[in-house]
Amino acid sequence: MKLEIDEQRLNSEIETLATFSDAEPPAVTRIVFTPADLQARAWMIARCKEAELAVRQDAIGNIFARWNGADPAAPAVGTGSHIDAIPNAGKYDGVVGVLGGLEAIRALQRSGFRPKNSIELLVFATEEPTRFGIGCLGSRLLSGTLSADAATQLKDHDGESVDEVRRKAGLNGNLQEVKLPKGYYKAFVELHIEQGPLLERAQISLGIVKGIAAPASLRISIEGAGGHAGGVLMPDRKDALCAAAELILAVENAARTSGAADTVATVGVCDVFPGVVNSIPGRVKMTLDIRDTDLARRDGVMQTIERASLSISAKRQVSIQSELLNADEPADCAPEVRSALADSCREHGFPFLEMVSRAYHDSLFISRIAPTGMLFIPCQNGYSHRPDEYAAPEDIARGALVLAESLAKLAGSAQ
Ligand SMILES: [Zn+2]
């Protein structure tokens, strides 16, 4: 089998997909089910049909493009990622795994390979949390991590429900049927940019993921007492922002002292009310995002933060309420997928790094229902989710080549 990736075509497709966007280039904004996203999806489906893949969509808009194997009833080997993009993002997040996955399949077709198990490209719907406030909606439903009933409760910023939005996009199926049957996939591999600087620093162009860190996120609301910035003397104050400041530092400290570099915690949103120069902040709303590869350690950090919040609340006489938005479990990547990736790297003489995925991906959820692994390629300076996100064409092609080789190993040859 002689596998060749068409690097030029793959990169020109990445450029074309980037034109379906609501932002000025090089930025890409492609919120799920907006006209730009629907155009991108239609273009993607056309590329899959061009490759003679059998295409179907489910009720939430996950796109499946299947290359039937010699044993079409056997579980498929899956690959894929997402094409939706947060506001002002780059061209490569998710896209590399979708178009790289498609090119991997085309390279296998050109080589004359005939798979025993089917190979399927999966374009996950609504990976980014931008529209519905929850990331990986498509893969959560596929894996049964989120129920169809819970999904229908979700609304976008305009108050439109998931059902209204998807129906407008022409997706009229039953959400209950999105969940994949047991044993649907024999294995799943996602190709993705690293979204961190480690590969570039190590000057190694491939990363095989051992485990995927999982986030827990909370919405925290601090209620103090507002008042005139001149009139209320310091001993009488219940300044919600001062309490928030203490809590933010407690969050940082809890993550720093967890005992492992894998623990990270971030307060990314802090809204201050009324937010005027001469008024004491009476209320603060903030978000907290905590991630780790170890569930017990992450939950331990959450408890430390909870204790800090109780003591700050008592000391400053403010009320601190927190609402858990999600708390997902980290995942270990499957040994058989990791070894297929590692063997493929070795056969081509490509060095690789074994690493942890600190961002979470659809693979985190697919790992609940299938042996799953991820392959990373470097991105410049580790930048992602910004317009200057960049992955070199040769790195993308190398990733697609190792992916193709691994899909062939996992699916087996019909000859
Ligand atoms: Zn992504």
Image (spheres, rainbow, N blue to C red):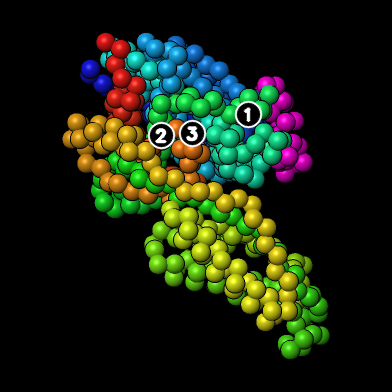
| Image coords of residue 33 (percent x, y) | 64, 31
Q: Which residues are magenta?
A: 153-173
Whether residue 401 sits left or right of residue 216 in the image: it is: left
- Which disc, if any, is residue 60? 1
- Say whether residue 346 is visible: yes
Give the quarter of the figure containing the C terminus.
Answer: top left
Tell me the residue at 70%/65% (across/down). 321
Tell me the residue at 29%/41% (across/down). 206
Q: Nearer the viewer, residue 326 or 376?
A: 326
344 vs 255: above or below: above
| Image coords of residue 388 (percent x, y) | 45, 46
Whether residue 313 sits left or right of residue 63 in the image: it is: right
Classified by dominant secondary structure, the portion drawn in magenta counts as: loop
Element at badge 3? loop
Q: CA distance from mark 3 to mark 1?
A: 18 Å
- Which amino acid, by three-letter code, is at mark 3? Ile
- Say whether residue 84 is visible: no
Q: Determine the image quadrant of residue 227.
A: bottom right
| Image coords of residue 147 (percent x, y) | 65, 36
Looking at the image, which residue sits at the far front? 182
Q: Nearer the viewer, residue 279 or 222?
A: 222
**Label 3: few (<14), some or many (≥20) within 10 Å?**
many
Element at badge 2? loop
Q: Nearer the viewer, mark 1 or mark 2?
A: 2
Residue beneath disc 3: 369
- Which disc, if any, is residue 371? 2
Q: Is mark 3 within 8 Å of ligand 1?
A: no
| Disc on the earlier residue, 3 or 1 | 1
Element at badge 1? loop
| Disc on the earlier residue, 1 or 2 | 1
| Image coords of residue 347 (percent x, y) | 19, 31
- Which amino acid, by three-letter code, is at mark 2? Pro
